[in-house]
Amino acid sequence: MNPIEELSPKVVWKNFYALTQIPRPSGHTEQVAKFLVDFAKQHGAEASIDKAGNVVMTKGATPGYEDRAVTVLQAHMDMVPQKTKDSKHNFETDPLDVYIDGEWVTARDTTLGADDGMGVAAAMAIIEDDTVEHGPIEVLITRDEETGLAGAFGLKAGELKGKYLLNLDSEEEGEITIGCAGGIDILCKMEYQEMNVEPEGMLCYDIVIKGLLGGHSGIEINLGRANANKLMARLLFAVVNTKMAWLCSWHGGNMRNAIPRECEAKVLVPKAMQEEFLAMVEKCRQTFTNEYKDIETNGFQLTATPVEDIPAKTIPEDIQENLINAVLTAHDGVLRFTPSMPELVETSCNLAIIDIADGKAEVITLARSSQDSMKQYLCNQYIACFSMAGMEVTFEGGYSGWQPNPKSPLVEMMADIYEKMYGKRPVVGACHAGLECGIIGVNYPDMDMASYGPTLVSPHTPNEACHIPTVERFYNFTLEILKNIPKA
């Protein structure tokens, strides 16, 4: 038995460890969906997979609770597949290498998947444990939340009967979330004709940025962490626009909702400019290190390594300059804080993914805001910026935020329970990260909803960890909520 399965409460940690052994990156959830259906049926619950790929389980009330309103336990089955640059882990085939580090559970060189595997594990525990007191329960485990909330968008009206919904996807124990920002993906694309170059007299270098902290582009966008794509744009602006180098390719980031930790670019350098080029790379390294010395504590690296094979083609001069200028100019990070709640980010964007090579260029950004007008402002800003670079700008997966209901009977009850259990009122508020409640609420407008969870740090990065003591508090809180759900 793995030591993680011995943590308390065992019924939660055992199920969480089982999930870590099943590959479940976003876009590849078929295996975990089948596992969840088989698990539910093994423990006497009804379960099925709907047309959107969501798993829906139902469990009847325990004796004496038959007259309670139906409660939905909701989480998402997919995880963000992030790993260190040197990791050989294959998220589509390999189990995670998870271990205990003091008061934390984490994974070796990869994301842990506690976002939202811990919510799934808690729901599984309640399905499994017949001693838990509760009314009728529905469990909704959605597909591909991390890459566009596809499962929540695909959930049909009438699929659920619940009056209350407990979203188990928040990441700070002691907080109850009642609202979140909306979001939209901004896609900038173009094709270009590569230019032939004479390799004679040229050197080739791979420029690599790595070792940044990255992070969740919703809950950690306000921490001032460096974006690898933006740092690379600054360096390329310095060396390409001064004719020290020609850009051949540029790749950075791989998830729209993860702050880019790594980036690499291949450039051609005239032999006569080699000394100046390397001096500028070193100057940028020192500058970036100094700027982020109090933030990027993970071991920031910027290197330029010579490559023997010299490409025969490169990006035309006007195209490379336009692309670099656009990325350098485009907004990234916090745009505005909420006027009525200055500690809460209202509007931000994450310049997440850059892929430029072989005659094609793509830039993907996730914009978030609790104000639809500000979200539109960011979209228009990107149209203005990237259309000048000759790129087509389109949008996907737009959704409005989850509007808070400060008079929610469910939230008032939960706050009273938490105070009775732990001697203090929980923090009740909204978050900047995207949650599925707002989307689900479109088809279920009368459903009373709240979100909470155990404490996680650095989700969407290989430093993701779950705080062990908070899992027991989170789970016991959930059991007490279920016990106190009002009559239908």
Image (cartoon, rainbow, N blue to C red):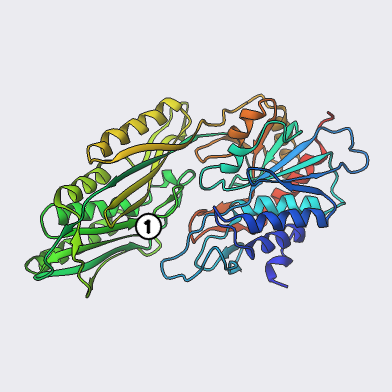
Q: Nearer the viewer, residue 427 or 243?
A: 243
Name the residue at 66% across, 60% down: 19
Image point 75% across, 34% down: which residue? 162
Q: Which residue is under mark 1?
A: 296
Give the farthest residue toward the bottom: 308
Amino acid type for the residue under numbered disc 1: Glu
- Depicted 230 relative to depicted 337: above or below: below
Q: Residue at x 61, y 62 (%)?
A: 103
Mark 1, other Cα within 10 Å: few <14 / some 14–19 / many ≥20: some
Q: Where is residue 215 in the image (x, y as percent from the top left)?
A: 45, 52
The residue lying toward the viewer, choosing from 414 and 387, is 387
| Image coordinates for residue 68, horizontal then vertical, percent | 85, 33
Q: Is residue 397 left or right of residue 467?
A: left
Image quadrant assignment for residue 5: bottom right
Q: Quadrant of the N terminus?
A: bottom right
Helix, strand or loop at mark 1: loop
Q: Which residue is drawn at 53% across and 40% down?
A: 434
Residue 51 place in picture, x, y as percent: 66, 43
